[in-house]
Image (cartoon, rainbow, N blue to C red):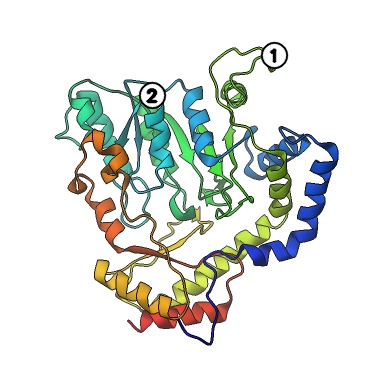
Amino acid sequence: MNKERSFMNFIDLPAQQQRIRMQIEENIRKVLDHGQYIMGPEIGALEQALVEYTGVRHAIACSSGTDALLLALMAYGVGPGDAVFTTPFTFIATAEVVALLGATPVFVDIDPRTFNIDPEKLKQAIQAVKQNDPRLHPLPAASQSAALTPKGIIPVDLFGLPADYDRISAIAREHGLFVIEDAAQSFGAEYQGKKAGALADIACTSFFPAKPLGGYGDGGMCFTDDDTLADLMRSIRIHGQGSDRYNNVRVGINGRLDSLQAAILLAKFSLFPEETILRQQAAGRYSALLAQNESLVLPYVPDGYLSVWAQYSILARDNAHRAAIQAALQKEGIPTMVYYPKPLHVQDAFAFLGYRPDDLPVSDDCARRIFSLPMHPYLKEDDQKLIADAINGI
């Protein structure tokens, strides 16, 4: 590490906190004063604020982004024998919740430019499941002994860039499938003039501290325009509650968001629109500084899309090139991350599905080459120049 500079933050939460520390403390004090630590008034206030921001009818706060996905799937009655199509190039939670309910995740490869699920391959995968024919698209081994029923699709808005919802929704309508937007990384992004969170039948986001809108602990939220689905998710998040807490009308989970987290998120949301603009500026500087480096593949944002830049992720030539870049950056005290080094279809947790690495070659290739640079609203231009100089010197 360069002795003349301190270690750079990958995500600078202290810089953000410095701006709103007094507001955060005041919001926490209000929770301590009223003592409603579970489902206090801050929950409704946060839900209403995000309803107005996204333009949807309903927002249902919950305990994590993972539980948001679980609530959505449970509202649709997903279970054994159901196939849910999703990407392998994401965090495990997306497919984990499918398996937890006894359903089968069917992995579909990604577009090499956006890193999001490839609609053409999605069509192939649905036909393969319907015909139980792995020659049309790689299928889980389990499906070859017992036919699966296509049930739904979970696209992931990876790194803050929405998936192609027009094409995905058209495919879903053709086959009678639901679509759940995994917006864990994309809250604040836009697609064709609509906000992330409003792009599918249900959308799910995460308030994990590193997310574009993150708390100081776990939290999540579901969004939908469907009144029936909203009522189901509200019930499921509190143990299947009916008319009161001791009237349980279905099996549910303990999926509530804490009042303290909602209070913190309300304070942080006051900065969020400005921070979204600052993220655009930081990403633009990176792209300008690295534009002449022909050894790299920089992030791609199609026309009509607005990324919220949860991550700024680049493809190196190969694994060795990535390692050299990471080593050069580390020498300067600059952290990097790899999202994701091992796609889900080859994770040990999903070994029972019987996928091979070459079943989904784009995901496998990206996993060997991708790396992410420090990304947050408070990146300094001089720091970005230092990062770019170190990379361009390889």
Question: Does residue 108 appear in this view?
Answer: no
Residue at the extreme bottom of the image, as rendered: 4
Q: Is residue 173 or residue 106 the one in the foreground?
A: 106
**Which structural element holds mark 2?**
loop
Quadrant of the frame with the C terminus: bottom left
Q: Measured from the top left, where is residue 99 in percent x and y?
A: 37, 30
- What distance separates the C-alpha of mark 1 from that of mark 2? 32 Å
Residue 315 occupies quadrant: bottom left
Q: Is residue 379 above or below residue 199?
A: below
Q: Measured from the top left, where is residue 337 in percent x and y?
A: 42, 63
The residue under the point 28% across, 36% down is 123
Mark 1, Cα crowd under 10 Å, few <14 / some 14-19 / many 20+, is few
The residue under the point 79% across, 48% down is 27
Q: Is residue 199 or residue 95 the one in the foreground?
A: 95
Residue at the extreme right of the image, as rendered: 33
In this image, 146 relative to 161: left or right?
left
Which residue bears the numbered disc 2?
176
The residue under the point 65% across, 65% down is 14
Q: Amino acid at mark 2?
A: Gly
Q: Amino acid at mark 1?
A: Ser
Residue 232 occupies quadrant: top right
Q: Measured from the top left, where is residue 353 in percent x and y?
A: 25, 34
Residue 136 occupies quadrant: top left
Residue 243's disc number: 1
**Which structural element holds mark 1?**
loop
Q: Is residue 146 above or below residue 311?
A: above
Q: Measured from the top left, where is residue 158 in percent x and y?
A: 43, 51
Quadrant of the frame with the N terminus: bottom left
